[in-house]
Amino acid sequence: MIDIKAFRDDPERFRIGARDKGMHCEFDRLIALDEARRRILTELEGKRAEQNRISKEIGPQIGKAKGALKSASDADRARLEAELRDLESKPLALKNQVAVLESELHRIEPDWHAVLLTIPQPPAHDVPKGKGSQDNIEIRRWNPAGFDAGRPFMANKGFTPRGHLELVKQHRMADFERGVKMAGTRHYALTGWGMRLHQAVLRMAFDFMTVENGFTAVGVPVIVKEECMVGTGFFPAGREQAYHIEESKRGMGHDLFLTGTGEVGLMGLHADEILSHEELPLRYTTVSTCFRREAGAAGKDTAGLYRIHQFDKVEQVVVCRADDAESRGWHARMLGFVESLLQQLELPYRLLQCCSGDLGVKNEDMIDVECWMPGRGEVGSDGMPTGAYGETHSASRLADFQCRRLNLRYRDEQGRIHFAYALNNTVLASPRILIPLLEIHQQQDGSIAIPVALRPYLGGAERIG
């Protein structure tokens, strides 16, 4: 959520930010609602202060008037009774005025809050402008020894590559037909080496973050309340992507939602808390099952393991002080972890600076990591795909956007309270990562060479097939 005070000071910054993200927002309505809300709050504060003042002043006066009535003459009684009625009516009139203002506030605040939640985080000043992923800018790329993603697979390896679907079928790594039978399209069952590879890469990534890089391992719920989805910025804009469990229809007080990333649970842990500056930065990692409806992706990557409804992901989250330089430093470090892991897996990849139109609602900056997949891309004259990069990771800086929504704060060395800054980054998501792993490491005979770093997680096996 944006800082409403910052919006009042410079609404044009947020208008430009939404425009650069390609989002339409009701800024004029927010301004009108905010002005009305501030007016009501100011009046309420004044009326309540007046209530306190009058209660202190009138109490003794009412007591004095009642005492005088006891011994008043008939001539004075009518005057004293009128004076008493006047004194007693003042608090009642103020109470009614406060009730009217509170009613107005209760009527306007839900609309004010709902519109405020739709205002996106403006892009950082150095994020390039663009309309969408086609305008993202390549930062750098890396290739393992003996492989150049700029050349066809045939030129690198000397043989025509098989796509991951063919390799999966050859080695009986997944059963798509039975997955669809049980759960519908975009579902699958991992079998044999497919399940072993899936577990191996997840464990390798999890150990890499916890054992080698000191992140705290956390297991979090993947079924959460709506406020957790709102707090992390996935609602309201991304509601159509989440699976909804309507528990309220079965007598529970709230509905639940399946999360699409471990980030939701990791960030939700400290909602409505004030941390000490000594506890920061929080460095958490989790491995969790993730669920995405992939609404709006009809006909896109429908075959195979690329775009599916259920997968597992090792996620990293950092919560740090409200300091731009510290946030940027962590962004670079988190990307470094991912690059190191991909290099150990000997997978060619590139980093893309996402443009303003590809950031989404909550990010002020985002860098995507894409792995080279020989089975993707346009079909060449030989009828075979030419290969293409496919997204496997995203690294986001969110400034205080999530922490404001979650009310996650910290107390600094001087005792002042601030909203913290948050970052998140995929460490590894599977089975999508199995696509480049299988396709890059395939051999001419169809077998799969296992990268040296992954072998300890597969009982020392060097090859599949």
Image: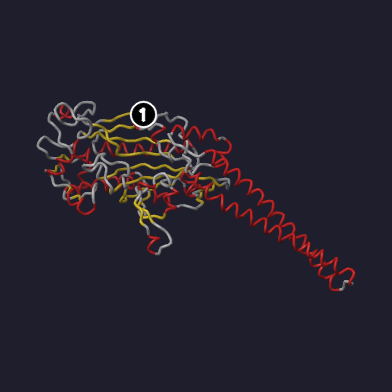
Left or right, 70 with respect to 35, comes to right
Left or right, 435 with respect to 6, comes to left
In the rendered image, which quarter contains the C terminus? top left
Q: Is residue 147 above or below residue 287?
A: above
Residue at position x 24%, y 46% in the image: 186
390 and 315: which one is in front?
A: 390
Name the residue furthest left: 445
Mark 1 surroundings: few (<14), some (14-19) or many (≥20) residues within 10 A: some
Residue 276: horizontal and vertical position, in percent?
A: 51, 50
Left or right, 368 with respect to 19, comes to left
Visible in this render: residue 361? Answer: yes
> Which of the 4 quarters of the picture holds residue 60?
bottom right
195 and 42: which one is in front?
A: 42
354 and 380: which one is in front?
A: 380
Name the residue furthest bottom: 70
Residue 205: horizontal and vertical position, in percent?
A: 29, 45
- Which residue is disc 1 drawn over? 135
Residue 223: horizontal and vertical position, in percent?
A: 36, 55
Question: What amino acid type should be assigned to the residue bearing mark 1?
Answer: Asp
Residue 398: horizontal and vertical position, in percent?
A: 44, 40
Query: What element does badge 1 sit on?
Result: helix
